């Protein structure tokens, strides 16, 4: 079955369960999980009820699509995302982004946990993603291209929308939430980086590194969806001052940064013209 037909079946099924018509989509990555509590939920659909949605692996969490209001706006939020390192194809990882477009989403907000490589960054800080380097060694758009869905060779100009970034910076200032800016390097994972790898990623222009986000962003840009992205610094990738890193450390640091990220994104949505 081609992806167009799959998407139609997925969207028809979702439409039969909700009347919501969100223009804003949010992927609740690490650091943004608590935003789920802020959404006045109208409809909640677990992924296993959605035709053609990837099935969650054991380690994935909730796995729900939330429809409701945030900051007075209709939003759809993905609680639980799919990662390349879990064994999904990048088509599976990015399928929800395609679905969001069919549901009417014009702007996608993404978040992730990252290793901070810029020595100016501190643990627990928020970073506005200004650009990315795709170091996953693959791309979700490899293969047949349906020109009706997007260009064969998509432009990555203004990938992280400048107007949305300006808004994010303005809101951060007003809300007194410190917000760094940086370039995100996406790797496949699941290994954290060696000291030599952190050094490499810093040298090639990266400020932070992580295992998600870029596939979804590429597909969003392919289909013309605007993107706003944030990273939460959960560990420091400083090659000359390496410390042990673990999933537990990352999650503990993410939990600390979460309230700031949640507040910022809620206020941004409130002030978006969508
Ligand atoms: N490297 C890669 N992915 C990550 C890191 C990191 O240091 N921290 C959180 N996700």
Image (spheres, rainbow, N blue to C red):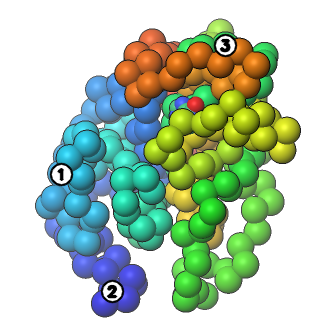
Mark 2 residue's CB less than 8 Å from ligand 1 = no
Q: Is residue 46 left or right of residue 228?
A: left
Q: Residue at x 75, y 62 (%)?
A: 156
Q: Quadrant of ligand 1?
A: top right
Instruction: Report the front residue among 100 and 134.
Output: 134
Mark 3 or 2, which is nearer the eye? 3
Q: Does the image show residue 223?
A: no
SS at mark 3 in the image: loop
Residue 8 placement (x, y as % from top left): 31, 79
Residue 130 placement (x, y as % from top left): 75, 41
Q: Is residue 207 left or right of residue 55?
A: right
Q: CA distance from mark 3 to mark 1?
A: 36 Å
Instruction: Report the front residue among 142 and 28.
Output: 142
The residue tagged 3 is 122
The residue tagged 1 is 46
Tell me which corner region of the image, top left, top right, bottom left or bottom right, holds residue 232: top right
Tell me which corner region of the image, top left, top right, bottom left or bottom right, holds residue 222: bottom right
Q: Residue at x 62, y 43 (%)?
A: 228
The residue tagged 2 is 5
Q: Earlier in the sequence, mark 3 or mark 2?
A: 2
Q: CA distance from mark 3 to mark 2?
A: 46 Å
Residue 125 placement (x, y as % from top left): 62, 17
Mark 3 or 1, which is nearer the eye? 3
Q: Residue at x 54, y 52 (%)?
A: 188
Q: CA distance from mark 1 to mark 2?
A: 21 Å
Q: Earlier in the sequence, mark 3 or mark 1?
A: 1
């Amino acid at each position: 079955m081609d992806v167009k037909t799959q998407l139609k079946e997925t969207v028809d099924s979702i439409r039969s369960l909700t009347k919501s018509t969100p223009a804003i989509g949010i992927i609740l990555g690490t650091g943004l999980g608590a935003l789920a509590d802020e959404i006045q939920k109208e409809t909640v659909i677990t992924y296993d009820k959605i035709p053609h949605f990837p099935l969650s692996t054991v380690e994935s969490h909730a796995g729900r699509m939330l429809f409701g209001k945030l900051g007075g706006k209709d939003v759809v939020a993905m609680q639980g995302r799919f990662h390349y390192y879990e064994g999904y194809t990048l088509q599976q990882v990015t399928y929800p982004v395609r679905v969001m477009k069919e549901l009417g989403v014009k702007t996608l907000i993404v978040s992730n946990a990252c290793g901070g490589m810029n020595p100016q960054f501190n643990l627990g800080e928020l970073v506005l993603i200004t650009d990315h380097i795709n170091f996953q060694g693959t791309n979700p758009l490899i293969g047949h291209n349906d020109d009706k869905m997007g260009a064969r060779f998509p432009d990555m100009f203004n990938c992280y929308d400048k107007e949305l970034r300006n808004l994010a910076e303005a809101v951060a200032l007003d809300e007194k939430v410190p917000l760094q800016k940086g370039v995100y390097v996406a790797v496949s994972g699941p290994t954290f980086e060696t000291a030599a790898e952190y050094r490499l990623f810093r040298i090639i222009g990266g400020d932070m590194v992580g295992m998600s986000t870029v596939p979804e962003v590429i597909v969003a840009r392919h289909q013309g969806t605007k993107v706003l992205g944030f990273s939460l610094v959960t560990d420091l990738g400083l090659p000359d001052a390496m410390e042990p890193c673990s999933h537990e450390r990352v999650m503990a640091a993410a939990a600390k940064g979460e309230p700031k990220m949640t507040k910022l994104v809620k206020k941004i949505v409130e002030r978006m013209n969508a």
